[in-house]
Amino acid sequence: MAKETQKTPLSKEAELMAKMGITEDQVQAKTTKSKVVALNTNADKLKDALRNGVKEINSSNGKLVQFNAIKRDGFLKDANGKIKLDENEKKIPKYVKVRVQGYFTMDKTSDGFYQATRGVQYTENYTIADYQELDS
């Protein structure tokens, strides 16, 4: 009588990685660093105001959650620093696991996973020779 082999169920994280086509060797741990920045310029003050406005909008529309995420981080490299290629001569992407916390709107997807979404602020920056103020 042949021995039965049972598949062990995948964790939700492993299931998601399989759906995205990411293998475990493509994922590495990520360390983060914090730094304090002084608000010296008008652009810094604008960025801070945007950050605070977006934070307020996210907190009023979302839930405070934390989760582990897989974030793209360049390409896998060999011991010599050369980018690894797959069998189709395409670069193999590298990912890092990061811990994310904040206010997100949460939506359940049709395949049982969750989509976490939050607003972010952006600024545009141009280096110019001169400018003209317009009446507003």
Image (tube, rainbow, N blue to C red):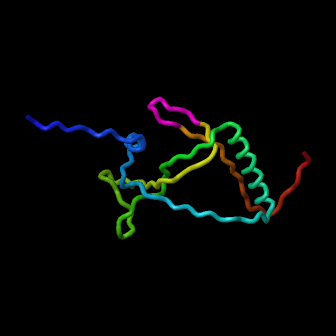
Q: Residue at x 42, y 44 (%)?
A: 13
**Which residue is rendered at x = 71% and y = 53% of the image?**
124
User: Quadrant location of residue 27?
Assistant: bottom left
The image shows a total of numbered marks equal to 0
Q: As rendered, which of 16 and 99 lies closer to the eye?
A: 99
Residue 45, magenta (yes or no): no
Could you say where residue 70 lies in the image, as x and y percent from the top left? Answer: 47, 49
Left or right, 60 with respect to 30, comes to right
The percent position of residue 16, horizontal first and vertical second, equals 42, 41
Which span of residues is magenta-colored? 106-114
Image coordinates of residue 66 in percent, x first then y, are: 56, 46
> Left or right: 102 with respect to 56?
left
Q: Which of the 4 image quadrants contains residue 92? A: bottom left
Q: Quadrant of the C terminus?
A: top right
Using the image, determine if residue 81 lies above or below residue 124. below
At a point 36% along the width and 49% down the height, the residue shown is 23
Q: Between residues 116 and 89, which one lies in front from this camera angle?
A: 116
- In the displayed orientation, state which residue is furthest to the bottom: 80
- The quarter of the picture where the N terminus appears is top left
Asked if residue 84 lies left or right of residue 40, the reply is left
* x, y percent for residue 64: 62, 42
